[in-house]
Image (spheres, rainbow, N blue to C red):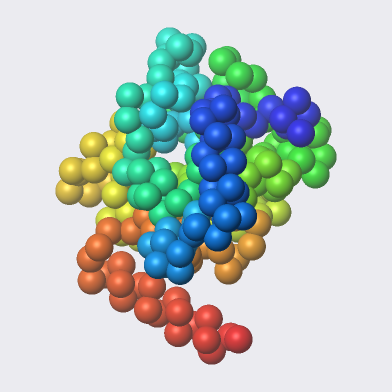
Amino acid sequence: VNPLINAVVDGPFDKAFEESQKIDERLEKGEVTAKEFAEKPFLGVPFSTKDSTAVEGALHTLGLVSRRNERATEDAECIRLMKEAGGIIIAVTSVPEVNRWQETRNNVTGITNNPYDLRRTVGGSSGGEAALISACGSAFGIGTDIGGSIRMPAFYCGIYGHKPTSGLVNTRGCTFRTGKEKSTMVVAGPMARYAKDLLPIFKVSQFDCQIAKTFIFACEIAFLLLA
């Protein structure tokens, strides 16, 4: 589907395939224990993230011609945590230059098209993520948001996205953040085809702090009341 929507910038494709094969073999042999599933709730699940979020070894251009050959040397913290939870990163996706625009277009990879209508925009700046998830090219993704960069592409592409409260997710490796900022408007958050998937993704990437735990508890109560 990518030749049509132009959402994928790069990815550890071979590595992801090898990892998934190993997990499939272990599952077939019954080698994965209940304890491992509990520790790695996303075991073998493919996910993606936007180009501006660092994935070790993958292109990290932020849509800038001056960075068209730049590669990340380490994972962003939210990516590292998701990998620890068993997730398999399969791709980094397109963004507008430095995540600045509400349309995902740049002079490195071109324009990203909406899976529902290739003539339409996907929004921005997490437009590549929204397009790939909407087209079933990725099970879920991790975007970033200041003024709508998760929420608008999710809306345009018919999926769900959540911008957590600032400070609940470590932003190290997201758009040049170090993770040590006392305050930042940039927040990393989940994107998925189903609303019920957002909270489990957030649980993996959130800080181990009381505010985050309170937020998760409130969400779980709300889900019970709506069930």
Q: Is residue 58 above or below residue 119?
A: above
Looking at the picture, tell me which residue is in the foreground, 49 or 80: 80
Residue 181 lies in what quarter of the image? Answer: top left
Q: Position of residue 214 (x, y in %)?
A: 31, 76
Looking at the picture, tell me which residue is in the foreground, 191 or 184: 191
Q: Is residue 150 above or below residue 202?
A: above
Q: Position of residue 134 (x, y in %)?
A: 70, 47
Q: Position of residue 184 (x, y in %)?
A: 28, 46
Q: Position of residue 87 (x, y in %)?
A: 48, 49
Looking at the picture, tell me which residue is in the foreground, 73 or 154: 73
Residue drawn at the location 18% of the way across and 43% of the way down: 180
Q: Give the farthest residue toward the front.
A: 29
Instruction: Locate residue 150 relative to residue 210 in the image: left or right.
Output: right
Instruction: Locate residue 159 relative to residue 217 in the image: left or right.
Output: right
Q: Is residue 69 above or below residue 51?
A: above
Residue 5 lies in what quarter of the image? Answer: top right
Residue drawn at the location 54% of the way across and 42% of the way down: 22
Residue drawn at the location 27% of the way across and 58% of the way down: 207
The image quadrant where one finds the C terminus is: bottom right
